[in-house]
Image (spheres, coloured by chain):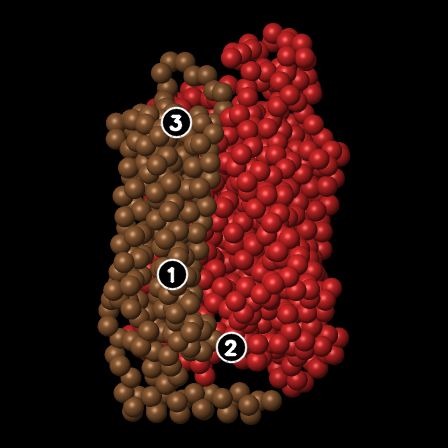
Amino acid sequence: MASIAQPGTAAPQAVVLPQAKKRSGVWDWLTTIDHKKIGIMYGVASIFFLIVGGLEALLIRTQLVHANNDLISEKTYNELFTMHGTTMIFLGVMPLTVALWNYIMPLQIGARDVAFPRLNAFSFWLFLFAGIILNVSWFFNEAPNQGWYAYAPLTENAWNPTRAVDFWIVGLTVAGISSMLGAFNFIVTILNLRAPGMSLMRMPIFTWTTLITAILLIMAFPAITVGILLLMFDRWIGTGFFVTAAGGDPLLWQHLFWIFGHPEVYIMILPAFGVLSEVIPTFSRKPLFGYSIMVYATAAIAFLGFGVWAHHMFTTGLGPTANSIFAATTMTIAIPTGVKIFNWLGTMTFGQVKFTTPMLFAVGTVAMFTIGGLSGVMHSIVPLDTHQNDSYFIIAHFHYVLFGGSLFGLISGIYYWYPKITGRMFNERMGRANFWLMFIGFNFTFFPMHFLGLEGMPRRYFSYGEGSGWEFWNTFVTFGSYVLGAAFMMLLFNLGMGLRNGRRVGSNPWDAPTLEWATTSPPAVYNFAEIPVVGHRDPLWAEKYGVSGDHGDDTADVDVTIAGMKVGELEGGDDTDKEPQRIEHKRAEDEGAGIQLPNPSFWPLVAAIGIFMLNLGMVIDPTEAFYLGPVQITISAFAGFIIMLIGIFGWAYEPSGVDH
Amino acid sequence: MAQAAEITQASGGSGHVGEHHEGGHHAPGSGIENRKLALWLFLASDVMFFGSFIAVYMIYRGRAEEVGVGPFPYELIDIPFTSVSAFILLMSSMTMVLSLGALQKDDIRGSRIWLAATAVLGLSFLGCQYFEFTEFYHAGLTMQVNIFGSSFFTLTGFHGVHVAIGVLWLLSLLYTSLRGGLTSKNAMSLEIAGLYWHFVDIVWIVIFTLVYLIPYDEVTSGAGEHASRLAEFGQTAIQSLF
């Protein structure tokens, strides 16, 4: 068909195919299958849920501000910590990760979209509906109250007769389907859609971590899904999978849960590691130290992550043999993790380190994660764990790895790719202040929890008595959590203001080395007018600074010639493209006249609405359509099932032209 | 085989958008077509699904006997009957291969016949399972009566759902074929369905072995008494809480 127009030949607007036309409006967002728009929707939705989860955390802290506080009832407190954990993990951090995957990864590998664009939209809608299902429970005053780990038999009908657990069951099922479908999509995209010349060992580390995390997702989620199905049968049908009297075993839930649950923590942290591996080299003006080792370390962490789940269960009485084995495998994970930390330090060493906002967050992540990692190694020692189990020490530990690690890393990524996504620069001064405020607030909040834990303060208790010795640090921690809340507001403010007032930037404001910086900011709908050909691990640096060495599949270390190179001013210094962005953008659109992109589709949304109705209808709808064996199928659930089928068949028989 | 490889080569890699490369640069894809790769990944994930269900079944194997509440597996399981249904399912894998082979040789009619045969065999397997479930139900086995019932119906039912989805998939392919939409050019559509179908068959071999073939210990009175005391203890524990 039409060949790609040469740059500068001003083709008339009419030549642009309808697919490449820029649209706006609600319908466009509802039917979009553009990975960038889906990425933005993921980002906005996950930030919304992060705010919700954050408010829940602030309520928890306010309740604990002094002894014998009666601000919140026990019931509400249980709901708050359950929903805080569930929201932060499944609706906050994971989707924020997926937002970056969606937006950045296809750009990094030089692709025009993901392998299955409609499936991608489907994943997003499912995630959004999962969030709605979980949070709609608040309006029924039956929010999940069993902890995010949902240990049996606390979740069984006998102890939890309301619909609270049911909301959690269906919400997590939908979230799980969404995550797994997304993971299939990303793996296929990375394996099949790389630009010419981009061998596996030339992929940016962020893309590597995306690949490995997606593999973790598809292997880990089945275990919890099976557990949830069994729990659903226990509650809805009356089976006895986790009921002792029936011969069932509550401990089985813990196994199924943590076989998923431990890989899950790597699902949350590895993408942040990927962000660090992009940010730190860029602002150290040096290629990543030990690229191949970084890849192998990531794979090793993922592999070992499947063999450590029982360290969450040391106090359940598995016996010394099992405990020793799981303690040993847990300690082993510290090795590849330590390798990564030294690789980042090695990258900064002798580099021209520039502490911009993304870099500050990245370095902060390394420091905070190291603290969390060290307390993690402490937990692998069984006698110590017995003491620390279910105490605030654990809370301190996993907030250091999941907040100080994952979320700080992802915020670093948000700041780093903000100019690429918006075409504008945030306020750098405010960004740095934002880092310090968040860093201080974070440490004020979570560091004293180590003390509280060692002094015996148990987690999940809604109150504590006077004279317990925990008053001072609890007040202190609550104060810290407000600082943290303010820092998060500052982040949102900075991101929001940048949209309006931010300085416009060119394609590569940071002078970064990877492919996403080769296209316009923000990228055109087709990403690249012409698919780039990759000859180097850091293609933009190789092109700009004339590094001709070919870092192919061999494991030879990266060029040092680039290391000492004078690269000039970083902040905006490389904004050589003084041309206003709009003109450049329009021209890019003309260039894209010959590029066929798949049509928008509303079938993914239809199918997702069907699944949403099917799941929520089974919980909140009292009507009765018919009985499927012992299960009462409600009218809305049945209608949802039909809508889902319509959506799937409409999707399957939709002529999309280019997509499958 | 050769033809299959050709199709993979042609439609794999960067085939999703109209890209134009010059200079003989090959996109470094996996060489496996997108949908096929996605299906392989789904199967990897499905292995974990079935693995978890099978693990649950194996952990609870013999528990019903310990608790002492029947019916017990050795009273119900009918190996000859299930062998027949397993044989039917395995034969459906063969007809699936024949259908794909015919399609790749552009023998549309042959591919339709074998495809229909596969769907019919799949339906027969489901019929056998329906019969078996009904028989067990009449013998008193339900999902609630004991842990054997719970885990048996869950595991075999989960597999049955897979077969049912497979049959629907085959029938919709048959529909496409009858409308002339299935030729050697898009044999990949059939090949992918075939991969899924074979996987479901292979899983049945594992389930058949673990659930049906490996003999169950018959209940001894001592064990039953011990277990029913356990159950009693559990009941009183629950009652004392309310």
Q: How far apart are the alpha carbons under marks 2 and 1?
A: 32 Å
Q: How many marks?
A: 3
Residue occupying the point 47% across, 27% down: B16
Viewer-proximal residue among A613 and B212: B212
Q: Nearer the viewer, mark 3 or mark 1?
A: 1
| Colour red, chain | A
Q: Amino acid at mark 3?
A: Thr
Tell me residue B183's x, y (percent). Answer: 39, 27
Q: Amino acid at mark 2?
A: Pro
Tell me residue A426's x, y (percent). Answer: 68, 37
Viewer-proximal residue among A28 and B217: B217
Residue occupying the point 30% across, 67% down: B211
| Callouts 2 and 1 in the same chain | no
Does residue A477 appear to the left or right of A246 in the view shown?
Answer: right
Chain B image colour:
brown
Which residue does the numbered mark 3 point to in the structure image?
A: B183
Pointer 2 chain: A
Does residue A446 appear to the left or right of A276 in the view shown?
Answer: right
Residue occupying the point 68% across, 47% down: A491
Q: How far apart are the alpha carbons under marks 2 and 3?
A: 54 Å
Residue occupying the point 37% across, 19% down: B25
Which residue does the numbered mark 2 point to in the structure image?
A: A153
Which residue does the numbered mark 1 point to in the structure image?
A: B129
Along the polypeptide, which appears first: circle 3 or circle 1?
Answer: 1
Element at label 1: helix
